[in-house]
Image (spheres, grey):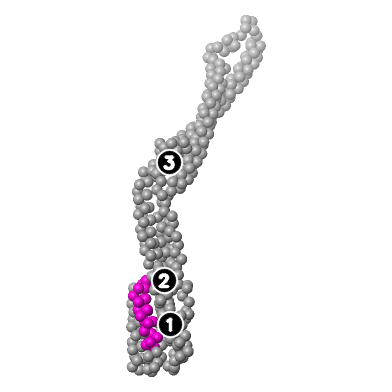
Amino acid sequence: MLALLLLLAGKEILRVAGRSLRSSSSEQMGAVVQGRDLQGLLLHISDCRVDPASCGDAADHMANYSANMTKSVNEDLNETRTKFDNLIVEAEACKMDSGGDHAASFNTKVATYAACREKQVAAAKLETLCDTNVGGSQTSKDLQCESTILTKPISEVQDICKPSPQQPLGEWIKSMAVQFKTQSEAFQKQQKLCKDAQWKLGNETDECAVHKGNSTEQIKACDAELGEIETFSCNWATGFTSRCSAYKSCYAGVLARYTKMKTDLGKNIEQWTQTWTAAKKMECTASAISSSDVVNATKMKECNSANLTNASFIKVTVPAMPQKQTCSEPEIYPGSKLFRSKV
């Protein structure tokens, strides 16, 4: 009698379990193991028909197989949800830079370039001021160093050495001492003014060389930034076709897999629900048989109840695919109106 109950209770369950095994989305190795478990269960039930004393073992095997079936359903559910999530990530990874993204990057580069040119203007003003200062210092140096006090020939001062007629020697010597002291002090003073002017001119010339170098380097830096902006915009414009084609191909590939998974989901949900229900019926049947092979008829009857288990959790919330981008013609590139208005 016990063997008959097991056979009747397990017949439909095993049919569903076998179908579930064949259509499961689990890994192939897992499916092989489950197949062996199913064959083992069938052997135990077959043995039960011959030797009723072994029916307890069949019930235990049925309980283990039920646990594997419910585990498989949960794994398939989680795997499906993960696959949908991964497809969304893939679709987002297909994303190409939009015109807005390029415009934002372009505007950032233009702002940096404009600041560079402002520095260039400031450097040019310093260079101009420097040139003016050097010119003034050159004039001052020439004025101080070409003074007649320093440049007049000796012959022009020789006359001061001639004594006046009948001038006593002592008075002449005293007069010469005053004359030489006056001339020496004037010479030394003018010589110092000349050296100071030369020193100032030298310092300003060196400083001016630094300003000129800074100005030249600033011009080079700004020209390099302009070249980078032109290359950046040109590459964006010329790469439009290949960029758009690559995006369409990538998005279409993801969308095809997403659509197939979404189409197959209904029958998979149905199959998982049947598997879950069969597993719970097997679990109930096994629990209705005691370790001493005694059948609890009341509990066995409950195993046939339509409300035996709640499988409403077997569902997958399908995430929406990211909206497909449109391929807009480039608007910013060297020579375009928008490019010229900003650079």
In percent of the image, x 46 and y 90: which residue is there? 297
Mark 3 highlights which residue?
332
Which residue is tagged 1? 281
**Secondary structure at numbered mark 2:** helix
As helix, strand or loop, the secondary structure at mark 1 comes to helix
Q: Residue at x 59, y 9 (%)?
A: 162
Pick the front one: 339 or 289:
289
Range covered by the magenta-colored residues = 6-27
Q: Is residue 111 above or below residue 198?
A: below
Q: CA distance from mark 2 to mark 3?
A: 50 Å
For marks 2 and 3, the one nearer the N-term is 2
- Between 113 and 151, the one nearer to me in the picture: 113
Q: Amino acid at mark 3?
A: Ile
Which quadrant of the figure has residue 184? Answer: top right
Residue drawn at x 40%, y 44% as measured from the top left: 329
**Vertically, is 262 above or below 147?**
below
> What secondary structure prevails in the magenta region?
helix
Picture coordinates of residue 326 (x, y %)?
A: 41, 49
Give the quadrant of the N terminus: bottom left
Which numbered disc covers residue 269? 2
Residue type indicated by callout 1: Lys
Give percent across and percent down for residue 263: 38, 65
Residue sitting at the far top: 165
The reply to whether residue 100 is visible in this rendering is yes
Mark 2 and mark 1 lie on one chain; the one further toward the N terminus is 2
Residue type at mark 2 is Ile
